[in-house]
Image (cartoon, grey):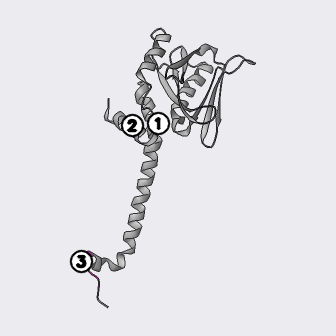
Amino acid sequence: MSTQQHLDDHIIARYTAQPTRLPAELRRQIEHAWQGAPVQLYALADLDQGLRLTEAWLALGPRHVAVARRTDDGAWDLRIIDRAQIQAIREAPGLSANTLTLLGAPGEPALALLRYTHRQRRAFENIRFVLEEQLAGHIRHLADVDADRLYAESVARPIRDAQALVSGRQTAVIRRLLGYLKPYRRNSRWGWRPQP
């Protein structure tokens, strides 16, 4: 594991209290259902239909998509969708959550409906991009993609960006405060103040 991925994992665990990667047992279950095909991308659908925090995963493989939801007894309810069945993708952005819908034949119920918070947005955008490219007739080969690294980077990057923004503001505040000391520079250097 690279240093960057280790830092990303730390950021995800500390600031989101969410899993840093697809659970290993679920990955094995998905890849077994796909006859050994690898998980190439994945994202955490962290909201249920009532917009309560939950744990459900969307995984993308070379020929399939898997939707896994944790059941009350802790097992995984796994649904496999052939990518060839997907005929349209809809995303509905919201103030605190987004909804991704995978649609099949017209008039049929949705193949999958996933809700997620903004912290998962980039991971879902990666999957949506690949599926939309497929619908447009462009095949994306993801053989060399490290799904764990890409997921961690997608979730951690907005947090790192926000930290950098705040850090820059703190520096500006300190500079401004030090600017107010200019008239008293000589006295402040020696740590004394003149007597009245």
Relative depth, front residue between 165 and 11: 11
Residue under pointer 2? 8
Q: Which residue is painted at 44% across and 54% down in the image?
A: 166
Do the CB atoms of the residues marked 3 and 2 lie less than 8 Å apart?
A: no
Q: Quadrant of the N terminus?
A: top left
Q: Is residue 181 above or below residue 7?
A: below
Q: What residue type is labelled 3?
A: Trp
Q: Is the magenta stretch mostly helix, strand or loop?
A: loop
- Position of residue 126 in the picture relative to residue 168 (left or right): right
C-alpha gap between disc 3 and disc 2: 44 Å
Residue 196: percent from the left, percent from the top?
Answer: 32, 91
Q: Which residue is painted at 43% across and 28% down in the image?
A: 21
- Mark 2 surroundings: few (<14), some (14-19) or many (≥20) residues within 10 A: many
Q: What residue type is labelled 2?
A: Asp
Relative depth, front residue between 131 and 75: 75
Q: Does the magenta stretch include residue 101?
A: no
User: In what element is the residue under mark 3?
Assistant: helix
Q: What residue type is labelled 1?
A: Val
- Residue at the far left in the pictured view: 190
Query: From this viewpoint, is residue 85 visible?
Result: yes
Do the CB atoms of the residues marked 2 and 1 lie less than 8 Å apart?
A: yes
C-alpha gap between disc 2 and disc 1: 8 Å
Q: Is residue 153 above or below residue 108?
A: below
Residue 133: percent from the left, percent from the top?
Answer: 58, 23
Residue under pointer 1? 155
Mark closer to the chain start, 2 or 1: 2
- Residue at the far top in the pictured view: 35
- Mark 3 surroundings: few (<14), some (14-19) or many (≥20) residues within 10 A: few
C-alpha gap between disc 1 and disc 3: 48 Å
**Circle number at residue 190:** 3
* Residue stretch in magenta: 189-194
Mark closer to the chain start, 3 or 2: 2
